[in-house]
Amino acid sequence: MPVRLAHIIREINHLPVNLLKMPSVELVQSWYHRSFEDLIEFAKIRGKSENEMADKFDLALKKIRSRHDTVVETMAQGIIELKESHGKDALHPSIQYFLDRFYMNRIGIRTLITQHLLICGEEAGKSKTNWIGCFDEECSIASVVFDAATNARFLCEQVYLCSPDVIIEEHNAIEDNERIPIRMTYVPSHLYHMVFELLKNSMRAVVEKNGEDRLPEVKVLITKGKEDHTIKISDRGGGIPKSELEQLFLYHYTTAPQPVSTGDVPALAGYGYGLPLSRLYAKYFGGDLQLFSMEGYGTDALIYIKAVLGEATEVLPLYNKRTSQTYSEVKQSVNQMKDWSSSSYYDGHGHGYLRG
Ligand SMILES: N#Cc1c[nH]c2ncccc12
């Protein structure tokens, strides 16, 4: 915990100076400094019994977790403050690089805190069968998808007064019978977060393209192979151009109207953070989340989750000398002379072509 907090505290200092001065960013920084200080206090405590120390430590962890509850929204507010005070040009590419690492670090810290409290804290021994802390060793992917679909349909109907059906299918390529329900060891809340976000986006696209009548269903296919569990969410929502796909993963890129910063921290939904954060959850245990779209037809969203437990290790940003160099490289890349003309493209195999 102290190392993870120290790493991100050091990394925050690489942010552009004008962003660091934003009130909301300064507030987030103060939370991380305070939490680091809370933890290193334990190295100084003497004369307490082990139980007293354990109880005090659990309380400290709960306080840290709740202190950081609104970090994502508050950091997003800081970037809106930067846009409003310095204009959109102030949004530097290094901010995207930083936010991916910053939010992945936060996922790791919160998972570690929750796991410790469920296994060692007052909740110890109260886990449900097959659960170890926040991990469900027999997590039914279809059950999580069903819950996410039920809630996404409810939300869709609140906004659009209609919602598409969701068809869930499984294909188990590992068991003799391909119809055996697919289960895995995972953190169900992480899986729910990803699937709920993708289903919301699919439903929004389907309703906005097709109107309220005869909505084409959203199909979810769950597969299990030797290496991957894969969840594919397919919609006929009209898709988007390939050129716009990566923008969906940029923080603050959204087609939803941006909230005006009124000083209060508006709900997260207005920031378009759902997709980039969902991709971080997929990557956190070595998986991935990718979108494939056919403009004019629809979109497939795929979540890849490692099927071999030994390969599903925690993925965390490392803070070292290379990090500082990377930040300066990201800054330089913005001004770097391009070495391909805009009318040519590079096929990735050593051949450059000029479009006719
Ligand atoms: N995530 C996601 C999406 C799933 N379907 C979509 N259609 C248009 C734009 C984004 C999406």
Image (cartoon, rainbow, N blue to C red):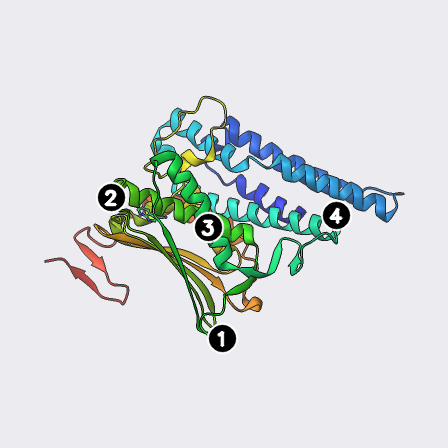
Answer whether labels 1 and 2 touch (C-beta < 8 Å). Answer: no
Point 54% across, 67% down: residue: 311
Give the spatial CA distance, label 1 vs label 3.
26 Å
- Label placed on residue 210: 2
Q: Which of the two discs, 1 and 3, labels the residue nearer the N terminus?
A: 1
Q: Residues within 10 Å of mark 1 (few under 14, many from 20)?
A: few
Q: Would the CB of label 2 be found within 8 Å of ligand 1?
A: no
Q: Is residue 278 visible?
A: no
Q: Earlier in the sequence, mark 1 or mark 2?
A: 1
Sequence-first disc among 2 and 3:
3
Total number of numbered labels? Answer: 4
Q: What residue is drawn where x is 40% and y is 49%? A: 198
Helix, strand or loop for disc 4: loop
Q: Nearer the viewer, residue 85 or 269?
A: 269
The residue at the point 23 percent across, 54 percent down is 340
| x then y, percent, for residue 160 | 34, 36
Q: Left or right: 295 with respect to 46?
A: left
Which of discs 1 and 4 lies nearer the camera? The answer is 1
Query: What is the CA distance from the residue labelled 4 to the residue labelled 3?
Result: 28 Å
In this figure, which residue is indicated by the disc labeled 3?
194
Residue corresponding to mark 4: 121
Q: Amino acid at mark 4?
A: Gly
Mark 4 residue crowding within 10 angstroms, few (<14) / some (14–19) / many (20+): some
Does dot 1 land on a helix, a strand or a loop?
loop
Task: Name the amino acid type tagged 3.
Answer: Met
Callout 2 secondary element: helix
